[in-house]
Image (cartoon, rainbow, N blue to C red):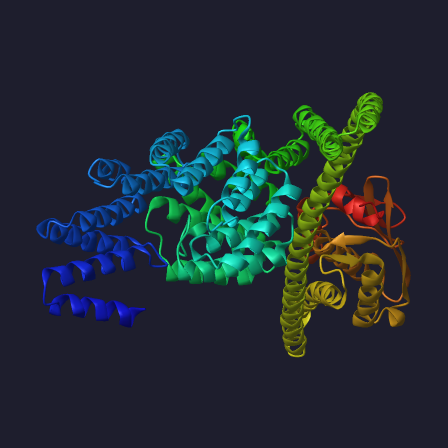
Amino acid sequence: MAKALNAISAGFNRAPTETNKNELAYALAQHNFNKASRSKSNLQSALQNALTSLSLSRKLNDTLAVDRALLVLGYTYLAQREFEKAEAIVSKLDSEKERIKMLLAISFFYWSSSATNADFQHKSLSYSQASLKLARSLKDPLSETISLNNIAVAHGDLRQKGAEKELIGLITRYNQTANPHLEYPYSYLAEYYRQNDRSDKATEYSLLAAQSLAKSKNDQIAGDIYFLQTWITYNNEQFNDALAFGFQAIEAYNRMPGIINVSNPDITLYIGRAYQKLNQHRQALTFLLKRQKQFPPEDISEQMAYTSMIGHVYRGLKEFQKAELYFKQFEKMSKQYDLDKYAARVNLGQLYLDWMHYDQARPYLNAALKDEKLLLTGARRHLHYMAFLADSASGNYEGAMKHMIYLNGQAESDRRKEVDQALKKWEVSYGKQKSEEQLKLKNQNIKLLLQRNLAQQQKARQEIQIRNLIAAGLVFVLIILLLLYYQYRQKQKSNRIILFKSTRLDDKNKVLEKLVKEKDYLLKEVHHRVKNNLHTIFCLLESQAIFLKDDALVAIESSRNRIFAMSLLHQKLYQSDNIKQVDMSHYFSEFLIFLRQSYALEAKRIDVYQQIQPLELDVTVAIPLALIVNEAVTNAIKHAFAADSGGRIDISLFVDQQLVTLTVKDNGTGFELADGHNDQSFGLELMRGLSQDISAKISFQVEHGTTIKITFALEEEQKNREFGIS
């Protein structure tokens, strides 16, 4: 094809005469106009070639050549949707036959563009009537038949009564022509029935059109017939057949354009949809992107078509965010150019419904329902079904009920149509019989059928009532289920929150537990080091005592005992799991053993008895208490007993409700509180000071020996630990 075009172009430049140049210019115009893709560049080339041919024809004063150049020029204007320029061509044509061709072409292009402009249907009808009038005046039966064909098609699009009869009558007229092309009336009848939701008839006549096409090999309408079959098989849910016919249509449009051409997005749309219905979404996306690259959109309507198609593919792939971007872009273009607002609403409504964003879906679907009169019954029913789903899911049960009632009513309407069609078929088949008996029988049967039909209608009304009751029950059950589901989801949400908080709390507890363990370890280490340091001091004092005598030795021994008392406490703390408290019963047992050994009490015949109730005290209380016991026992050993007289020291510790009582008692000679012994008076002062540190009361009683009693309140926290209260 490209080589042929180059040859024609080269021939034009070398043409020896103006006539030859004119023929070549006309051939180029025809060639560019009839290219498979009526792109802007191809049509612009056709326009320039036609203008060149027109100029040369006028220069040559060739009337026939002028008319044919004007025709191609007019066709090109029509393909570019420049209708006013094309209409101006009619009056310039010299031949009335050529005027008929131009009038029919204008009628055809107005009709093929009427989907975007309802006024174009009336203009198409007007130009068809003008061509019919001229054809009848010229007694041109073929042009008259084509004009009647266009008029019948326009009547069908405008839903005028008698359109079906007109289209059926065209079959007879085409049969009367010299070369009948029955594919035309068959295909237009199929399109008429498709628009009126009569899929059985649409399928029947589309097959007849295909059979006629197989005989005529008419490339001018081949693509349109295959595309019509694509449309019908798709609507009949025969998606594999729709794919096959779709690719046949592309092949035919590659040979010659028809109502649409090979670059038109409509054929791409239905092939893409068929892929999607077969769940071949990736194939659909690949096909769409390939076609978009091969035939880039040349106007806003084509750009919108591809945007919508790709959005639907992403919706099928469940890539909802990508789909939303394309549908939002489509909506923006729709508002900006005031085009296809219905599709913009349905696209977004269906997307949000699939995405389970029901509150976002409802406004779009409800807005689309306002245009429902423009829809075929199937599309209208599907729109109500989507609105029912969105309303019921978002809790608008009143709206959902209205949609369900509509759907039930539509189902009943379809059933009545089937009965009426069956009755009409019966009437047609019996209308051909002429005998009086058959006519009587027919009338009887018609009456019987009418009676049955009335009974069926009554039954149908009852069924509708029953269905409505069932529907109401279903809606009620649906409400209950939705409430249960809502409760279930709320419970799940609460459980997730509780689990999340519990997990966080566990994590925090683990961190705190770790910190506590680290702190306990560090405290144990501190107690250990303090004990070691005190033991070192103890050893130093013990070493020093070897070289001391008299009062100095006594002072060193007293200090050594006090240091040992504290050292032993720290030892108990780091050896125990409880690093804050000391079991006083265990502690006093070990400490008193030390004092026995330190003062050689067995040799002095001094017995020490203890009655210590198991009691754990904080280290802040235990150390002063240990030092008090040390001072009391030491004083008793040193001052209570005469030499070699022997004696007894009793130590007791018990808890009575809120009070802790420590008693150190001996059976010695007793002492005066101000008897002048320095070491004893220092010890007494030390005991008083230590008692004040722990808010304890200390008392001294000298009667048959000395009794030192210390009482203090057990802190509430200490009591809780002691008695296991948490």
Q: Nearer the viewer, residue 617 or 133?
A: 133
608 w.r.t. 702: above or below: below
Residue at left offset 50%, top offset 57%: 216
Q: Nearer the viewer, residue 522 or 681?
A: 522
- Position of 719 with respect to 86 (left or right) is right
Location of residue 361 (image quadrant): top right
- Position of 394 with respect to 572 (left or right) is left
List x then y, in percent, for residue 397.
69, 27
Quadrant location, the C terminus: top right
Quadrant location, the N terminus: bottom left
Residue at left offset 48%, top offset 55%: 222
List x then y, in percent, for residue 660.
82, 45
- Position of 577 with respect to 29 (left or right) is right
471 w.r.t. 535: above or below: above
- Position of 619 with respect to 51 (left or right) is right
Q: Nearer the viewer, residue 427 or 252?
A: 427
List x then y, in percent, for residue 55.
12, 50
Residue 527 visible somewhere in the drawing: yes
